[in-house]
Every structure is written in structure tokens, then in C-alpha cells.
Image (spheres, grey):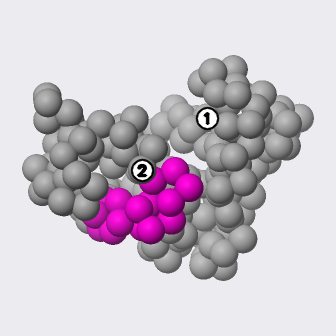
Amino acid sequence: MKLVAISGGIGSGKSVVSHLLTLLGYSVYDCDSRAKLLMNRSEDVKRELREAFGDDVITHQGMVNRDVLSKIIFGNAEALKTVNSIVHPRVVAEIMSLAGKCNDEYFFFETALPQESGLDKLADAVWLVTAPVEKRIERVIKRSGLTREQVMARIASQDYSNIKNNRVEYIINDENKSLTNQLLTLLTKSL
């Protein structure tokens, strides 16, 4: 079985690619949603976040306060590194556990920043989804209500130049090329 990371910046279309792969019958692990789930379900994670950032990061209902945590980590590399050191090892363990139980030819995992989590080293290949910047900005504004400046700041904070996997292949999501055809081509290639 091959482990394939599906990655790309905000608004690039990595979730669309993941959805298409799911429709094609493949298992796709969404690192972002699973990390959020782990953060809210794991008492150990919540305890470590509280120890690192204070009581305000956990709501009275016992859930991670995403707004508070986002304000702490956005633009603060050390705080982000701390959160990642708490959450990423658990995500990696879950991926390895699920992939070990999978009998498919491929196991996919969607991750925004594979190099920060070390998932680029775990993957046999990285499929980097790209799209023109203006298209990405338009998509994110439409779905999230963020301002152009906020989207640009998020795009600027994502760097893919240091992915440590020499098996990076590109999927172009610019609406001028069929994503399905691109995926089928990559699936038929020998990894």
C-alpha cells in the first residue's frame, strides 16, 4: 500500500480532490478535521493545551476554544509549534493505525502543511494541489466570509518550498483541466 499526502494552500482545492477520491472508492483521512476531533475528545490533549496556553483555551463545556487558540497561534511561530507538538504525533499515530488496517492499494491523507507535521516524510508521494492565487482568494472569500487581506495573510503564511518528499506531483485545480482525469492519471502511475 502507498501512503499519499494530498496537500495545498488555502483555496487550492485539496478538499475537492479528497472528495473525488472518496467517490472513486478510496480511503481519505482528513488531518484537519481529525485533529480538531482529537483536540476535543482527548483529555490529554486538552490538559496539555491548557498547561501551555491557560484555561481560556478550553470552554466551560470542555471543548477547545478555537477562537482563543487561533488568536494565540496566528502569527506566533512558537505557539503554533507548541500546538503542533501536542496534536501532530497523535494524528500520525492515527494515520498509521488506520493505514495498517486498510487493504487498498492507496491510503490518502489530506493535510494543509505536511512539512510542519512531518507527514511529508511519512508519505510515499505528495500530491500538491495548486490553483491561481486570484482563484484561491475568490474561493475562500466566497465560502468563509474572510476579507481579501485575511486570505492573503493565510496564503502568505503557507510555504510549500521545503516539502521533504522527492515524490511531489502536482494537481492543477484551475477549472481548465479535468480534476478527475488528473487523478486517474496519477492513480495509474506507478508510485
**Amino acid of disc 1:** Val
**Amino acid of disc 2:** Ile
Q: Earlier in the sequence, mark 1 or mark 2?
A: 1
Q: Position of residue 170 (x, y in %)?
A: 74, 58
Residue 100 picture quarter: bottom left
Magenta stretch, overall SS: helix
Name above or below for residue 82 compared with residue 104: below
Q: Secondary structure at mark 2?
A: helix
**Labels 1, 2: front one:** 2
Residue 22 left/right relative to 145: left
In the orientation shown, which residue stands out farthest toward the left? 43
Magenta extent: 73-90
Q: Nearer the viewer, residue 110 or 38?
A: 38
Quadrant of the image containing the C terminus: bottom right
In the drawing, what numbered circle is on residue 72?
2
Q: Position of residue 33 (x, y in %)?
A: 38, 40
Q: Secondary structure at mark 1?
A: helix
Question: Mark 1 sits on what residue?
Answer: 16
On whether residue 89 falls in the magenta region, the answer is: yes
Q: Is residue 88 visible?
A: no
